[in-house]
């Protein structure tokens, strides 16, 4: 066996598809390829010490361990394999999957449609060998006109981060977050373009686009019987527009979404600089029965007096206050203090940025109401949430993330 060949793993629960891709890669040459029709066996082999796999061609929809669980395990094993996603799923789900994998430090070089074509396979394998994914080139400056064209072209979309109840682990909230599927630059997160939007006065436009998409998604969930609270971001510029509360109410009505099932997320910086127009918009949103959540609490030193003036139903505590909270007494005390403030003003406390089991256990013991972060799941396409919830419920049980309750028939009757 030649030792200088790049090692490729093909992982797909369809044995015939594994055979086809293995033959295709062998025909291309220059690679040593191993096929796996069982995702668990594949994961063990790929993450084994000294395995030396260079690239993994991965199906998303597999039994036992699906693609998203595969990502998490590869990230935990600190794998340096390049990923090629080979799936018949929708473009939005593939885009979401790539985003989630990259957020965990993995390198996604592209998607291989089914049935695979040898010319596309060749290009992706060559790209994987460069050590640079197509989504990580040096980016040119983004102009406001680019962003406006992206809105018109439908390149702006939402992912949804699951937020679970701390006591039971039940899914209760889906938090919308915006992404830009840029044709050349790949998937862009808000940090890459929101400042451009702010400078160009386009943040309000983006907020309205997000509300339209998120309310439409919530309507689809409700039609499927998935009753969730929807959390949506609202930029400060949107709050400065006098008709924004009316737009939000009309948008909710068009999609059949009760405003009481929506948490309008206000970032701490906007609320800290509360202007008369902002205050009026916030009050009118409450008048229309929308709920309010304060985002990134504790990150920017917001004057606590604002909490007296604005009635928040929920407070999302910044990830920076969660990091290391279980390891040091001071960090833990700060987190406890933020949770206590939330409860004292009658708000739900959500801890964001839960990255591992230690964060999970510690935060649950603090008396927090809800938990969110990579340990639970990265943001995903809205249509993937129902399937994720099923897998999450199994995980809560098998990993004993919450105290196990006896079967319903053995529990004392509620009185």
Image: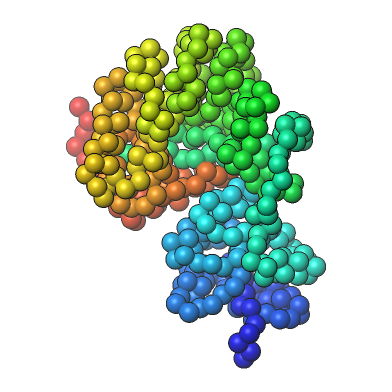
Q: Residue at x 34, y 16 (%)?
A: 305
Left/right placement of residue 32 relative to residue 405 reads right
Q: Judge whether 375 appears above or below 152 on screen.
A: below
The answer, for residue 401, to whether it is visible in the render is no
The answer, for residue 180, to whether it is visible in the render is yes
Q: How many marks?
A: 0
Q: Residue furthest right?
A: 119
Q: Which x, y percent locates residue 29?
A: 74, 81
Q: How is the image coloured?
A: rainbow
- In which quarter of the view is residue 19 placed? bottom right
Quarter placement of the N terminus: bottom right
Q: Residue at x 26, y 28 (%)?
A: 340
Instruction: Out of 383 and 307, give the one closest to the viewer.
Output: 307
Q: Residue furthest bottom?
A: 1
Instruction: Out of 324 and 34, give the one closest to the viewer.
Output: 324
Q: Which x, y percent locates residue 120?
A: 77, 64
Instruction: Out of 354 and 217, give the one closest to the viewer.
Output: 354
Left/right placement of residue 131 relative to residue 233 reads right
Q: Which x, y percent locates residue 148?
A: 74, 30
Left/right placement of residue 183 relative to residue 253 reads right
- In which quarter of the view is residue 197 placed? top right
Q: Which x, y percent locates residue 38?
A: 53, 70
Quarter placement of the C terminus: top left
Q: Judge whether 49 appears above or below 182 on screen.
A: below
Left/right placement of residue 162 relative to residue 298 reads right
Q: Residue at x 59, y 30 (%)?
A: 214
- In which quarter of the view is residue 30 placed? bottom right
Q: Residue at x 45, y 26 (%)?
A: 268
């Amino acid at each position: 066996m030649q030792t200088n060949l790049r090692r490729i793993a093909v992982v797909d629960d369809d044995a015939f598809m594994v055979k086809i891709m293995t033959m295709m890669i062998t025909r291309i040459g220059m690679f040593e390829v191993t096929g796996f029709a069982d995702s668990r066996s594949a994961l063990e082999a790929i993450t084994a010490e000294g395995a030396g796999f260079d690239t993994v061609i991965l199906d998303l929809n597999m039994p036992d361990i699906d693609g998203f669980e595969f990502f998490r395990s590869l990230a935990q094993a600190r794998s340096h394999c390049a990923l090629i996603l080979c799936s018949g799923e929708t473009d939005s789900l593939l885009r979401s999957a790539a985003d989630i994998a990259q957020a965990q430090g993995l390198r996604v070089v592209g998607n291989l449609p089914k049935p695979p074509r040898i010319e596309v396979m060749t290009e992706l394998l060559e790209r994987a060998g460069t050590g640079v994914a197509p989504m990580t080139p040096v980016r040119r400056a983004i102009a406001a006109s680019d962003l406006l064209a992206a809105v018109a072209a439908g390149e702006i979309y939402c992912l949804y981060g699951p937020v679970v109840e701390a006591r039971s682990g039940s899914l209760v909230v889906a938090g919308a977050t915006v992404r830009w599927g840029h044709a050349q630059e790949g998937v862009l997160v808000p940090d890459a373009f929101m400042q451009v939007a702010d400078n160009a006065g386009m943040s309000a436009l983006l907020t309205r686009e997000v509300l339209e998409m998120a309310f439409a998604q919530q309507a689809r969930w409700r039609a499927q019987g998935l009753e969730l609270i929807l959390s949506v971001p609202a930029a400060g510029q949107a709050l400065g527009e006098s008709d924004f509360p009316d737009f939000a109410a009309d948008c909710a009505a068009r999609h059949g979404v009760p405003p009481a099932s929506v948490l309008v997320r206000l970032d701490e910086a906007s609320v800290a600089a509360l202007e008369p127009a902002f205050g009026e918009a916030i009050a009118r949103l409450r008048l229309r029965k929308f709920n309010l959540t304060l985002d990134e609490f504790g990150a920017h030193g917001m004057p606590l007096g604002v909490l007296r003036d604005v009635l928040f139903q929920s407070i999302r505590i910044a990830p920076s206050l969660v990091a290391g909270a279980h390891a040091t007494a001071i960090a833990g005390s700060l987190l406890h203090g933020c949770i206590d403030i939330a409860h004292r003003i009658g708000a739900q406390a959500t801890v964001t940025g839960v990255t591992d089991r230690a964060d999970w256990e510690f935060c649950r013991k603090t008396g927090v109401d809800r938990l969110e972060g990579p340990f639970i799941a990265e943001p995903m396409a809205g249509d993937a949430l129902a399937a994720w919830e099923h897998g999450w419920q199994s995980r809560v049980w098998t990993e004993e993330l919450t105290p196990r309750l006896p079967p319903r028939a053995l529990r004392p009757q509620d009185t």
